């Protein structure tokens, strides 16, 4: 009885070799949202299994990186930090940078790491890079909380710009996810990509104002635009401006970053969509 | 009505893979870039060959049908299941599927060794398409089926492989789709658990009205579960009908057919030169066949080519079950009239009575030795011999690996408080 009643509303799956299908199949993604959370959760659980400190590593890692930067750039090189304590200044940069780098890193490896699932189970392939985003964002939120704790300790108070903080993070994530979609699709075919990404990320870490400030470069003002070609530059500045109320990037530069982020995301979607059907065949 | 009853409709389905020859396909970025520079246009000048895993396939499956898909390795079974499950995409063709699909192509996909049994149930469940709420509802049932209550909070990396498989299958067995697609997954676990799984599948197939597509090499499983079988050969549907009929034609296909050419047999002991030329299985009426009834007499014709005379040779033939266990062996030296000598091109004809074997597929091994028991030639898994379904036991109860390899008739009487309440025995009147 029940079967007959529900038979009329059975879902209909159409597979057509010739039809490309929608760029993003939102209803299908929503149907699989539980998988998205579960995979993100798995990622988080597994990362800190059999570690003594467990989840503390989420904040310990960026904290140690910030300490190193504060020591090398702040103490040894004696760079100025826009008037903030160097540790807080560097930690803010690292928090924003890590959001970008973690999303890119995890998304790009997400397809290859789950090759077994790709070749044995159906689910919207986009779930894998998306779950990488979720797990990276969980890490970032811990980092942001610690950021506020540090600001409270150092008595640094944010201004009204703090309300824009999620916006900058969102643009960073969109940019990173776009790159992640591209690189993850390429990595299915060419594992070389896995070796290139860490190198590029390391380069990015130093050419972006993570541990140094745009207001204190030795470059003449005429060449600052070269640094601003990097879409991360103004986003990192904006992130710190939201926290400390100083060093706002030019609006045009921010607009540029936004446009680049959206363009990269769209390109990433296109590449992913184009390659998606052959993932299971070549992985 | 009829279109509503359709669960799966496949039209003009093909799937090709490109195979590049001479190992020229670029597998890393450097090669790809170098290739691109050498041949800026076109495909890089490689020899590409299209391999059609599936060629122009059409079929329909009605809602509620339980269909077995059989065929040799490479016939396209797994590719077909992967396309129907939307894991890979067809090259041409159209498919319409009405209903939610769950596919089980492997047991335990997505299990993570570091996570506990409990965590993996939720992980695997949602990978297979269940919502968290569904998993919560079925959690106790899953754990119960798997029998791993005590180890729920232990990481599965510390599980025995048996426990691991049981838990994985238990999750999958509690899926609740309208259409279930299952690849050869019953081949895991011990015999007892396999039977439990088969039983579960049978339950699902008979009582839920679910549509099931099922690939198996286990012919008993196909016969027990399916009401229809589709035989694939080189990517095409070559037969579609009742399981026992399709299976007969499957078994009668040349390779496992009644005559096997032994000159270049892959399973020959590599250190031995081919002396055995061919082997033919026949029934007592001299009709070549590889399908026998339990207890039937098998006639063997073996042709040999020897480059010298062999005094007091012995030819032996052994039968193995699907687990590779030897059930019995027959040999010329064990007969009343041993062979004195053989030379040149010669023929051996032997007859032996089969025991009452449980229906299924069995493998033959043959060997030829000299008077010092040294192997002159020996080939394992040389040919398949199928025991057809039979009513030898008087019941058509499913045959499970638990029954062993031989059917034995038995009689029983039951007493409650000293009163005989049933005594069927074997009431068959043949």
Image (cartoon, coloured by chain):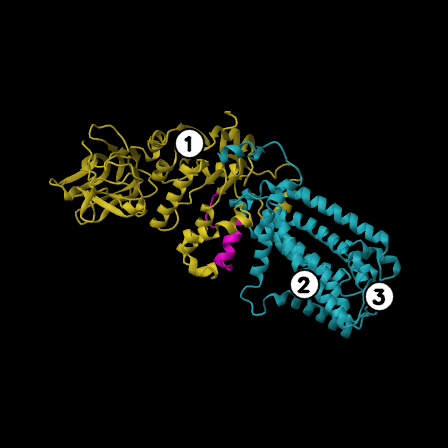
Chain colours: A cyan, B yellow
Crowdedness of circle 2 by 10 Å Cα count: few (<14), some, many (20+)?
some
Q: Which chain does the numbered disc 2 sit on?
A: A
Task: Using the image as rendered, state which of residue B319 and residue B112 is in the foreground.
Answer: B112
Task: Using the image as rendered, state which of residue B50 and residue B101 is in the foreground.
Answer: B101
Q: In this view, does A173 lie to the left or right of A243?
A: left
Single out the mark in the foreground, 2 or 1: 2
Task: Look at the image and give the residue range highlighted in magenta.
Answer: B104-125
**Above or below: residue A133 compared with residue B265:** below
**Above or below: residue A94 compared with residue B92:** below
Which of the numbered marks, if any, corresponds to residue A142?
A: 2
**Residue indicated by mark 3:** A216
* Residue at position x 68%, y 57% in the image: A101
Q: What element carries label 3?
A: helix
Q: Distance between the residues labelled 2 and 1?
A: 56 Å
Task: Using the image as rendered, state which of residue B336 and residue B153 is in the foreground.
Answer: B153
Place of residue A55 in the rendered image (x, y in percent of width and height, measured from the top left): 61, 65
- How many numbered markers are drawn? 3
Q: Which chain does the numbered disc 3 sit on?
A: A
Single out the mark in the foreground, 2 or 3: 2
Magenta stretch containing residue B393, yes or no? no
Q: Distance between the residues labelled 1 and 3?
A: 74 Å
Place of residue B392 in the rendered image (x, y in percent of width and height, measured from the top left): 23, 36
Is residue B108 visible from the viewing direction of this image? Answer: yes
Place of residue A99 in the rendered image (x, y in percent of width and height, measured from the top left): 70, 58
Q: What element carries label 2?
A: helix
């Amino acid at each position: 009885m029940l079967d007959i009643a529900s038979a009329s509303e059975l879902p209909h799956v159409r597979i057509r070799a010739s039809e490309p299908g929608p760029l993003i199949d939102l209803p299908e993604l929503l149907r699989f949202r539980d998988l998205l959370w579960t995979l993100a959760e798995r990622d988080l659980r597994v990362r800190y299994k059999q570690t003594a400190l467990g989840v503390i590593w989420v904040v310990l890692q960026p904290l140690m990186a910030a300490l190193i930067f504060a020591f090398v750039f702040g103490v040894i090189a004696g760079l100025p930090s826009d008037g903030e304590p160097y540790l807080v200044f560097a930690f803010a940069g690292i928090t924003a940078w890590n959001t970008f780098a973690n999303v890119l890193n995890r998304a790009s490896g997400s397809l290859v790491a789950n090759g077994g699932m790709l070749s044995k189970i159906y689910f919207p392939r986009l779930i894998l890079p998306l779950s990488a985003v979720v797990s990276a964002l969980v890490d970032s939120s811990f980092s942001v909380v610690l950021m506020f704790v540090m600001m409270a300790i150092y008595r640094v108070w944010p201004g009204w710009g703090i309300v824009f903080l999620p916006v900058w993070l969102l643009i960073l994530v969109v940019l990173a996810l776009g790159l992640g979609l591209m690189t993850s699709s390429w990595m299915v075919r060419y594992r070389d990509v896995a070796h290139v990404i860490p190198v590029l990320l390391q380069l990015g870490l130093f050419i972006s104002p993570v541990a140094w400030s745009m207001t204190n470069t030795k470059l003449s003002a005429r060449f600052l635009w070269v640094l601003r070609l990097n879409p991360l530059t103004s986003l990192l500045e904006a992130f710190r401006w939201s926290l400390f109320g100083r060093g706002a990037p030019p609006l045009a530069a921010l607009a540029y970053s936004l446009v680049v982020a959206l363009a990269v995301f769209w390109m990433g979607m296109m590449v992913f969509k184009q390659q998606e059907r052959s993932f299971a065949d070549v992985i | 009505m009829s279109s509503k009853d359709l669960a799966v409709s496949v039209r003009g389905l093909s799937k090709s893979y490109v195979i590049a020859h001479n190992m020229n396909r670029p597998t890393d970025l450097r090669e790809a870039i170098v290739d691109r520079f050498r041949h800026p246009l076109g495909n890089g000048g490689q020899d590409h060959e299209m391999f059609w895993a599936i060629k122009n396939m059409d079929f329909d499956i009605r809602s509620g049908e339980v269909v077995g898909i059989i065929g040799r390795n490479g016939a396209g079974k797994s590719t077909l299941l992967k396309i129907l499950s939307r894991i890979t995409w067809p090259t041409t063709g159209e498919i319409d599927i009405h209903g939610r699909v769950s596919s089980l192509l492997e047991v335990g996909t997505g299990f993570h060794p570091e996570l506990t049994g409990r965590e993996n149930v939720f992980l695997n469940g949602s990978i297979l398409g269940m919502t968290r709420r569904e998993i919560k509802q079925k959690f106790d049932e899953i754990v119960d089926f798997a029998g791993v209550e005590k180890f729920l909070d232990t990481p599965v990396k510390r599980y025995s492989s048996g426990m691991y498989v049981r838990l994985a299958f238990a999750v999958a067995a509690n899926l609740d789709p309208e259409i279930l697609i299952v690849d050869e997954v019953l081949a895991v676990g011990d015999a007892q658990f396999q039977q439990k799984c088969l039983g579960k599948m049978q339950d699902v197939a008979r009582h839920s009205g679910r549509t099931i597509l099922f690939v198996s090499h286990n012919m008993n499983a196909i016969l027990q579960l399916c009401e229809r079988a589709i035989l694939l050969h080189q990517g095409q549907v070559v037969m579609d009908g009742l399981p026992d009929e399709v299976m007969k034609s499957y078994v009668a296909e040349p390779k496992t057919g009644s005559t096997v050419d032994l000159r270049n047999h892959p399973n020959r002991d590599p250190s031995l030169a081919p002396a055995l030329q061919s082997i033919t299985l026949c029934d007592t009426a001299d009709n070549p066949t590889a399908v026998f009834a339990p207890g039937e007499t098998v006639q063997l014709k073996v042709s040999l080519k020897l480059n010298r005379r062999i005094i007091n040779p012995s030819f032996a033939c052994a039968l193995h079950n699907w687990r590779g266990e030897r059930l019995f062996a027959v040999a010329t030296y064990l007969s009343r009239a041993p062979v004195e000598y053989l030379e040149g091109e010669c023929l051996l004809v032997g007859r032996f009575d089969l025991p009452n074997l449980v229906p299924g597929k069995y493998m033959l091994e043959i060997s030829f030795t000299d008077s010092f028991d040294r192997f002159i030639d020996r080939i394992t898994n040389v040919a398949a011999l199928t025991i057809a379904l039979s009513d030898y036991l008087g019941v058509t109860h499913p045959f499970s690996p638990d029954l062993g390899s031989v059917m034995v008739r038995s009689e029983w009487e039951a007493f409650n408080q000293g009163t005989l309440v049933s005594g069927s025995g074997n009431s068959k009147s043949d």
